[in-house]
Amino acid sequence: MSDIKRIETGARMSQAVVHNGIVYLAGQVGKPGESVTDQTKEVLAQIDRLLAECGSDKTRILTAQIWLADMANFAEMNAVWDAWVPAGNAPARATGESALATPDYKVEIIVVAAQN
């Protein structure tokens, strides 16, 4: 049986869990109240950092779930996402609208990646 490694574990959740060569990230959010562009940039930077800590990177992302508080911000979020995703390495992705933890959060992204 493979070991389970937990990263940045708190009482409620871990920011990342690694099992059997797969990295599972918790939903990442940006600074409350910032613009969709700024929150998306911050979320993607957090994803880069966590993946690196887990022995992976954005070229290894298998799936991404993106939650927007308002689908009217889809194009604004995509502008940042499209600049971040390496050409030829786009993951399977779903995007939806949802009420997030607080009204100040506009973007939440969850990814699953393979380790390097």
Image (tube, rainbow, N blue to C red):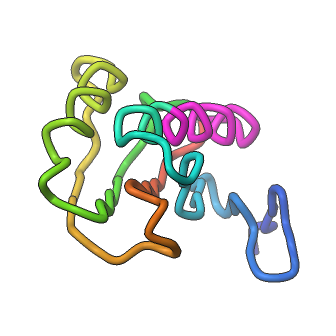
* Residue shown at 37% from the left, 48% from the top: 62
* Residue shown at 57% from the left, 31% from the top: 45
Is residue 1 within the magenta segment? no
Q: Is residue 63 left or right of residue 34?
A: left
Q: Residue furthest bottom?
A: 12
Q: Which span is picked out in magenta?
A: 42-56
Q: Nearer the viewer, residue 32 or 54?
A: 32
Picture layout, residue 91 above or below residue 71: above
Report the magenta stretch's main SS. Answer: helix
Q: Is residue 37 left or right of residue 101?
A: left
Q: Quadrant of the N terminus?
A: bottom right
From the top left corner, tell me how far across and down residue 38 is, in percent.
45, 33
From the top left corner, tell me how far across and down residue 40 is, in percent.
42, 39
Q: Is residue 50 left or right of residue 25?
A: right
Q: Quadrant of the C terminus?
A: top right
Q: Nearer the viewer, residue 6 or 4?
A: 6
From the top left corner, tell me how far across and down residue 75 is, in percent.
13, 38
From the top left corner, tell me how far across and down residue 44 is, in percent.
49, 36
Is residue 55 within the magenta segment? yes
Tell me which corner region of the image, top left, top right, bottom left or bottom right, holds residue 23.
bottom right
* Residue shown at 22% from the left, 69% from the top: 97
Q: Is residue 64 left or right of residue 34?
A: left
Q: Count the marks: how many?
A: 0
* Residue shown at 87% from the left, 81% from the top: 11
Picture layout, residue 77 above or below residue 79: below
